[in-house]
Image (cartoon, rainbow, N blue to C red):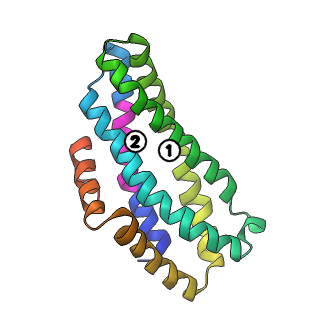
Amino acid sequence: MTPTQTLVHEHEVILAVVEAAAREAEGIRENGSVDVGRVGKMADFFAGFADACHHAKEEKRLFPRLRERGALDKGCPIEVLEREHEQGREHVRAVRAALPRVSEGDAGAVAEVADHLADYAAMLRDHIRRENDVLFPCADRHLTPADQAELAEGFERVEREETGEGVHERYHALARELTGRAAGA
């Protein structure tokens, strides 16, 4: 599997949880209550898997290599994608910050959770589409076979040394729990 194929596969898992988060936001708006435990698990998944594992591979490995290859000048929208990663982090931080206030009965915090979950889901759907349809084909055109091999090893190092042994699998299991279906291997 090439590095971009690995990232596309991770996108499938992330999108399954994004769809669950969008449904959760809809349900919160309809009934005015938040399942704090479930939303907390979603925030954990987004922070731990989508950001600390998946985005780390892009930001620490793929994007720097693409910059080295001059891909910014050749249509690879790296800077836009990095800004969106930060926007996503802000949404997840806001959800996490609102959850204790939800537990205290703060109605405004309930609305914040719904809004940030919905906004995050909408943003991430577009972001993933842009990466799958624009960035990854651009990357595959500009990366050499040696680059591909180094990135694959770099991705494994991110999972082993930064994310932690077995954490990737734990987040896949959490994705299955949150979506009620197989969300990838």
Which mark is on residue 85?
A: none
Query: Which quarter of the rendered picture does the N terminus lie within?
Result: bottom left
| Residue type at numbered disc 1 | Arg
> In the figure, is residue 20 to the left or right of 51?
left
Q: 88 or 129: which is nearer to us?
A: 88
- Residue at 50% x, 44% y: name it: 125
Circle 2 residue: 18
Q: How packed is label 1: few (under 14 Cα within 10 Å), some, or many (20 or more)?
A: some
Spot occupied by residue 90 in the image (x, y as percentages of width and height):
53, 38
Circle 1 residue: 125
- Residue at 31% x, 33% y: name it: 39
Residue 74's quadrant in the figure?
bottom right
| Residue type at numbered disc 2 | Val
Task: Determine the residue located farthest toward the right in the rendered image.
Answer: 73
Work out whether 100 lies above or below 77.
above
Work out whether 43 lies above or below 162.
above
The magenta span reads: 12-23
Predominant SS of the magenta segment: helix
- In three-dimensional space, the C-alpha distance between marks 1 and 2, rounded to whole angstroms, equals 8 Å
Spot occupied by residue 127 in the image (x, y as percentages of width and height):
56, 48
Spot occupied by residue 85 in the image (x, y as percentages of width and height):
56, 49
Q: How packed is label 2: few (under 14 Cα within 10 Å), some, or many (20 or more)?
A: many
- Residue at 36% x, 19% y: name it: 101
Query: Which quarter of the rendered picture does the C terminus lie within?
Result: bottom left
- Secondary element type, mark 1: helix
- Residue at 40% x, 42% y: name it: 18
Work out whether 47 lies above or below 22.
below
Residue 170's quadrant in the figure?
bottom left
Q: Was residue 97 drawn as part of the magenta stretch in this picture?
A: no
Spot occupied by residue 118 in the image (x, y as percentages of width and height):
46, 30
Check if mark 1's residue and mark 2's residue have beta carbons within 8 Å.
Answer: yes
Q: Earlier in the sequence, mark 1 or mark 2?
A: 2
